[in-house]
Image (cartoon, grey):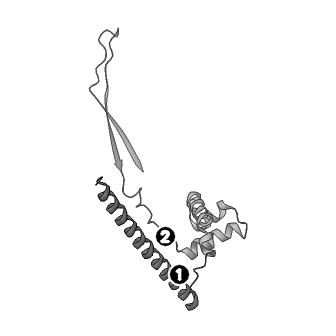
Amino acid sequence: MLDLGVQVTGLCPASDGIGESRRLSYTYIWAYETEDCPMPKERRSFSGAEKMAILREHLIERGPISEVCDKHGLQPTVFYGWQKKLFEEGAAVFEQSRAKTPRQEAVEQRRIAFLEAKLRNKDEVMAERLGEHVALKKSLGEF
């Protein structure tokens, strides 16, 4: 049980009561009685399977959210948070990681090698053209 005691200090009544305001100073005293105030409950954590089972009770079995939450000792905001996360991230369950076959891997490696060779060729051509350009500028005296 919470006991709230109030102590008033510095009580100064107005002498004539006209145009004077006096400030009262209050000190609040909070006292907790240990036998009436039990320790807070421990935070519980639910596994993914437990969360899905609780959500299933509402979504598939059509149980009212208030009853489902009361049954499992949940706050409705926690339930709605789980439901939101399920709907937002649920598509990831249906995504399949596609492992490449050895043939696909070989095709990809050949394509990478071809593109690297093409890039090297382009770099060589650019270097040759730039060299010709610099030589032309030097011969014209612009460089």
Going 55% across and 61% down the picture, which residue do you hit?
A: 78
Q: Position of residue 21 (x, y in %)?
A: 33, 16
Q: Quadrant of residue 107?
A: bottom right
Going 53% across and 81% down the picture, which residue do you hit?
A: 111
Name the residue carrying label 2. Answer: 45
Q: Quadrant of residue 7?
A: top left
Going 40% across and 73% down the picture, which residue do you hit?
A: 124
Q: Amino acid at mark 1?
A: Arg
Q: Quadrant of residue 69?
A: bottom right
Q: Residue furthest bottom?
A: 102
Residue range corresponding to the magenta coloring: 9-13
Name the residue nearer the viewer: 89 or 126: 126
Going 58% across and 82% down the picture, which residue do you hit?
A: 98
Q: Quadrant of the C terminus?
A: bottom left
Report the disc number at residue 28: none
Instruction: Tell whether position 11 is magenta.
Output: yes
Instruction: Tell whether position 1 is magenta.
Output: no
Q: Amino acid at mark 2?
A: Ser
Q: Position of residue 128 (x, y in %)?
A: 38, 69
Name the residue carrying label 1. Answer: 111
Local crowd size for mark 1, using a 10 Å CA cut-off: few (<14), some (14–19), many (≥20): few
Q: Position of residue 20 (x, y in %)?
A: 32, 12
Select label 1 or label 2 by which is in front.
1
Q: Earlier in the sequence, mark 1 or mark 2?
A: 2
Up-down: is 51 above or below 2? Answer: below
Q: Residue furthest left?
A: 10
* Number of numbered discs overlaid on the protein picture: 2
Up-down: is 14 above or below 45? Answer: above
Name the residue nearer the viewer: 76 or 137: 137
Helix, strand or loop at disc 2?
Answer: loop
